[in-house]
Amino acid sequence: MAVFNPFVPSYKSNPYRQYSRLRADDPVHRSQALGAWVLTRYADCLAVLRDQAAFSSDARNARGPVADAIDEQRRGSPLGRTPTVLTSDPPDHTRLRGIVTRAFTPRRVAELRPHIEEIARDLLADAPAGEFELMAGLAQPLPVIVIAELLGVPSEDRARFKEWSNAIAATTNVVTREDEALAARQATEQLVEYFGRVVSQRRREPREDLISALVTAEEDGQRLSEREVLAFAILLLVAGNETTTNLIGNGTLALLEQPEQAQRLRDDPSRLAGGIEEMLRYDSPVQGVVRFATRDVEVGGRLVSKGDIVLAMLGAANRDPEQFPEPDTLDVAREDVRHLSFGMGIHFCLGAPLARLEAQVAFGVLLERFPHLQLGEGGRERGGTFLLRGPSRLSLAGGQDRDALD
Ligand code: HEM
């Protein structure tokens, strides 16, 4: 009988072996341990993501013990059950998403490139010619600084943002321990207080930033409630951080394992944008998304009952041989990489253009500063949670002095 066991340490180091076995033996798997359906085929994941009417993002549609636990957690949260884009269905979702969509269009985001390059170069400016710890040195601070600036809060507060956002991200694990749930609740309380102050200031004096846009937004004559503004600001801070950090970390790990691919990117920088899509496919920062069945519905030949929890494993879909030939090989020149790492359908990642740009900038400077990119003596360590995958430490060597480049 097929099993799915994300509790074993080998899952953290390499979940793809388990996905591959499951996809072959039981692609629409009912996991007793998780109390959820686990989907590992590309076609099934795509079908679920595209059908928001049958597969809701709102946990109030869930039934059973896991659903009760989710509800309990939400009730204990300072923002209660305030909907966000991520956790709502239309019409709430449409209203909320409409408000900030304009801030994240590819064109608006492209205007940020020179500034993001400046931030990345500044971060690398102090990097020693010898060993460089990528996660603390670049992958973590870059997205935090960028989103803080977009929101309009001082990026000097980034150590606190990182702490808060880590505490909240920890709740994306298979099981959330009591102490982790408490830490996440406290982090949310502190974020509510922090953003609460900023929101009052912007109400008095709006500026050209995202928080002002949230405060002054009118969609169909309806303003966002105070709680919705706070929940949105917190979501933007958290959603864009861990994920982009993990893309930079996972992509670099993949290039370390296959240095010839790094060389191909150096030889032809026009491949970089496509190469980043392949990195996203190869080792997805978000391994899975959760949905709740709103009615009895068939998935890949199995009957999913109303209220069931469905996990669409994006990391597994991205390695489905039916969709991607030789899925376990990183090929930066792969064409038509239609990965699911940013999701699909109405919840498709709002920050995708920004994440792509940050990754292009990060890999651009990295490949330039590290002509002989290799693993440093400090080594590497896998971090992340069940749903978020990325290294916690990644030491690099093979760099060149900045002076040698100037
Ligand atoms: C490599 C980096 C990123 C990855 C892999 C990623 C992944 C995802 C995925 C898979 C979803 C869909 C969730 C679902 O369907 O339930 C999503 C949604 C979302 N992402 Fe990202 N994300 C990244 C970066 C960002 C950034 C930089 C921001 C914002 C600054 C952001 C903001 C959001 C928001 C607001 C949503 C919810 C959209 C909706 O539900 O309509 N993300 N992201």
Image (cartoon, rainbow, N blue to C red):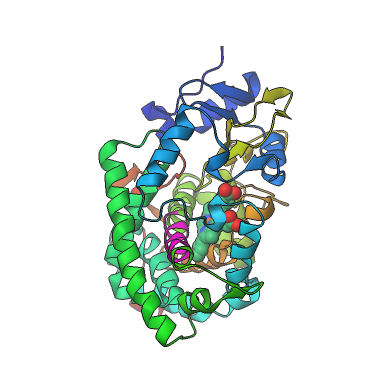
Vertically, is 172 above or below 261?
A: above
Q: Nearer the viewer, residue 218 or 339?
A: 218
Q: Residue at x 53, y 79 (%)?
A: 216
Viewer-nearest residue: 331 or 31: 31
* Picture residue at 49% right of the left edge, 67% below the top: 225
Q: Nearer the viewer, residue 84 or 382?
A: 84
Relative to 315, is 66 above or below? above
- Relative to 311, residue 270 above or below: below
Residue 306: x and y in percent read 64, 30
Q: Specify the segment rendered in magenta.
A: 230-242
Would residue 290 be visible to someone looking at this image? no
Q: Position of residue 350 (x, y in %)?
A: 59, 62
Asked whether residue 354 is in view, the answer is: yes
Q: Position of residue 193 (x, y in %)?
A: 30, 66
User: Residue 171 vs residue 339: left or right?
Assistant: left
Question: Hey, which quadrant is residue 325 in on the image?
Answer: top right
Task: Determine if the magenta segment contains residue 266.
Answer: no
